[in-house]
Image: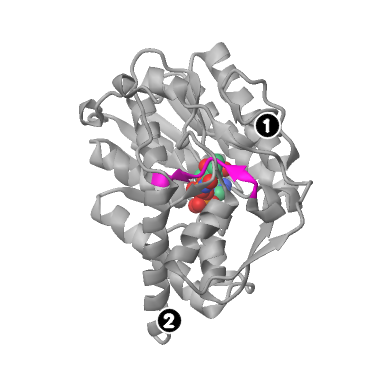
């Protein structure tokens, strides 16, 4: 990477901005809310708490007792941190225009970030109606509020996904590759991208489309492979490596993603672009498992036949984010995932010891 194109993060500021995060109590959302606040913005989080959040965690019968305690603690920590940072949190279902309008009009955001979704491609395929509803109706409502005459908000950042690219033809993709999304989740994201682009074209609302990939980081309760593998290792269950774990993903530390989004929110000229914001270098599932094995030596790795139905993925090129945002991701799997893994083990052990507290 060309280090010279990096712009010091110290020069970036959101002072004077009022940032509204739709779906902001989620994994990415709460990290982003805290960072926007740290960068000087007033922040409002609206969330219906239903997906990968408190309503789901307390009511899902498939979650074991220990995990329920652990995840509840992660969620309570999210809310405490946001409250301590003076971030306003409102229990709003963004599909309900009246509810969203009240929050929007009262807060008068200058920028909005759209994060609401069923953020799992597998679950979205199982519940297409709900998945489209959560992704698209919420975005429609937000854009409608931004479109109104005298709206305070003229910049929407839309959290899309690397899955819009579909199967990678080579080892990497950049933003010039034409999307070929497969499945409900990826198509919903692609429709969202089209909606924000059209809103710029028709109504002049600036946008930033962000395509992240395979995130991991503290207080995540989403059950992606980066979290599930650690839990399996802790519970003595095998880590199943399809095709020997040769599948490659551009694993990204949430702190890097959040810095990239803040840089995009702070950008004054040259907005309305699509950015890959990832670590920018894919690694194998076997690499991930090897790090877990170092931290939890008893972890059992088991090879399985390849799963041809899984999409072929790889690296998301980061040159555009480097050029326009001056952004270089800082910490890869070997450092950041190892730290996350150690943190997870600590939290798990603490939860085991606290069996009668919640
Ligand atoms: N985590 C990743 O690896 C990843 C990768 C690519 C893209 N994304 C996208 O980034 C966004 C955030 O992801 P995340 O990992 O934080 O997911 P998450 O599930 O932790 O957060 C989504 C939040 O949206 C809220 N929400 C859902 N429907 C809502 C509604 N109708 N009204 C208000 N709030 C609602 C949920 O309660 C939840 O708190 C999602 O759009 C996801 O698709 C995530």
Tell me if mark 1 has few (under 14), some (14-19) or many (20+) residues whose alpha carbon lies within 10 angstroms of its own: some
Which corner quadrant of the image does residue 36 belong to? Answer: top left
Can residue 92 be spotted in the picture?
no
Q: Describe residue 112's horizontal placement relative to residue 181 as left or right.
A: left
Q: Is residue 49 magenta?
A: no
The magenta-colored residue range is 246-254
Q: In terms of secondary structure, where does tag 2 sit?
A: helix
For image coordinates 55% across by 76% down, the residue present is 235
**Mark number displayed over residue 352:** 2
Residue nearer the viewer, 222 or 314: 314
Give residue 136's position: percent from left, percent from top: 63, 36
- Image coloring type: one colour
Residue nearer the viewer, 306 or 5: 306
Which corner quadrant of the image does residue 283 belong to? Answer: top right
| Residue farthest to the bottom, as pictured | 356
Q: Describe residue 69's horizontal placement relative to residue 127 as left or right.
A: left
Tell me if mark 2 has few (under 14), some (14-19) or many (20+) residues whose alpha carbon lies within 10 angstroms of its own: some
Q: CB of residue at label 2: within 8 Å of ligand 1? A: no
**Quarter of the figure that contains the N terminus:** top left
For image coordinates 67% across by 41% down, the residue present is 185
**Mark number displayed over residue 147:** none
Q: Describe residue 130's horizontal placement relative to residue 218 as left or right.
A: right
Can residue 109 be spotted in the picture?
yes
> Which residue is the site of mark 1?
168
Q: Is residue 249 magenta?
A: yes
Residue nearer the viewer, 236 or 293: 293
In the image, residue 215 sits, relative to residue 273, either above or below, namely below
């Amino acid at each position: 990477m060309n280090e010279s194109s990096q712009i010091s993060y110290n020069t970036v500021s959101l002072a004077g901005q009022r940032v509204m995060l739709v779906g902001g109590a989620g994994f990415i959302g709460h990290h982003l809310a805290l960072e926007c606040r740290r960068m000087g913005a007033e922040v409002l989080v609206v969330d219906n708490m239903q997906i990968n959040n408190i309503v789901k965690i307390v009511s899902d019968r498939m979650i074991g007792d220990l995990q329920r305690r652990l995840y509840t603690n992660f969620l309570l920590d999210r809310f405490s941190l946001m409250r301590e940072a003076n971030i306003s949190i409102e229990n709003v279902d963004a599909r309900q225009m009246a509810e969203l309008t009240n929050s929007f009009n009262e807060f008068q955001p200058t920028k909005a970030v759209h994060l609401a979704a069923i953020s799992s491609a597998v679950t979205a395929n199982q519940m297409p109606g709900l998945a489209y509803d959560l992704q698209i109706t919420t975005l429609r409502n937000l854009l409608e509020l931004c479109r109104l005459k005298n709206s305070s908000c003229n910049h929407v950042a839309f959290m899309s996904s690397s899955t819009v690219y579909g199967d990678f033809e080579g080892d990497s993709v950049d933003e010039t590759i034409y999307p070929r999304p497969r499945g409900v989740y990826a198509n919903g994201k692609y429709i969202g991208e089209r909606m924000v682009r059209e809103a710029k074209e028709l109504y002049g609302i600036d946008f930033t489309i962000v395509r992240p990939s395979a995130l991991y980081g503290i207080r995540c309760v989403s059950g992606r492979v980066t979290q599930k593998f650690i839990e399996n290792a802790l519970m003595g269950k095998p880590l199943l490596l399809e095709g020997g774990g040769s599948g490659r993903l551009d694993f990204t530390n949430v702190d890097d993603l959040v810095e990239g989004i803040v840089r995009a929110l702070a950008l004054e000229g040259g907005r309305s672009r699509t950015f890959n914001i990832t670590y920018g270098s894919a690694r194998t599932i076997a690499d991930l498992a090897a790090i877990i094995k170092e931290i939890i030596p008893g972890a059992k790795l088991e090879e399985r036949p390849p799963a041809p139905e899984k999409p072929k993925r790889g690296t998301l090129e980061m040159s555009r984010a480097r050029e326009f945002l001056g952004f270089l991701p800082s910490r890869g799997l070997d450092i950041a995932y190892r730290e996350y893994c150690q943190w997870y083990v600590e939290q798990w052990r603490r939860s085991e010891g606290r069996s009668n507290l919640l």
